[in-house]
Amino acid sequence: MRWNKGFTLVELLVLIGIFVLLAGIAVPGIYNYVRSNRLATTTERMAADMQLARSMSIANGRVYRLQANDAGYTITDPLSGEVIRNRTFHQSVDLAADVTVNFFPWGMADPRVVVIRGGAGNIQTIQILPTGVVEVN
């Protein structure tokens, strides 16, 4: 008796069909996860840079300014024009409105709420309190 080893063409096509079906189910979930992760990462990075601007303002005794728009944000020393941070947003992330925040040497800041939008209607907010504290909501 002779035994055939291997798979038939029909068996291989069924296996490929199962893999395609599983991939079709998984891809939308992975895509949404990546978009929400981009939004969270952008929000946390911006909040950390705001905290850096406040710390540098206190340490150096100078005003530092954050200016943000849909493309990204820049932290500068308005007196010297020195750029401290310059970041751009990913194409799927933007701001609801342009924002300018000054961080003062005594630890305070212009109170603002920054609304960051991601894909699929997701939003996150950063609140800058008058005391200079930066909170992510």
Image: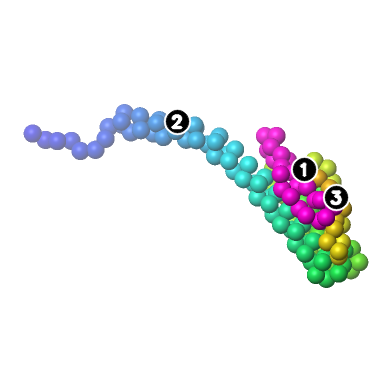
Q: Earlier along the polypeptide chain: callout 2 or callout 3?
A: 2
Residue range of the region highlighted in magenta in the rendering: 115-137
User: Which residue is denoted by mark 1 in the rendering?
Assistant: 115
Q: Quadrant of residue 9?
A: top left
Q: CA distance from mark 3 to mark 1?
A: 13 Å
Q: Nearer the viewer, residue 91 or 123?
A: 123
The amino acid marked with disc number 3 is Pro
Give how far across and how far down residue 27 sits, in percent: 53, 36
- Which quadrant holds the N terminus? top left
Residue 21 tag number? 2
Name the kind of residue labelled 2 in the image. Leu
How many other residues sit within 10 Å of disc 3, few (<14), some (14-19) or many (≥20)?
some
Going from N to C along the chain, the mark reached first, 2 or 1, is 2
Residue at (30% x, 31% y) in the render: 11
Q: Is residue 7 visible to us here?
A: yes
**Residue at left offset 78%, top offset 47%:** 127
Residue 96 located left or right of residue 9: right
Q: Which residue corresponds to mark 3?
A: 111
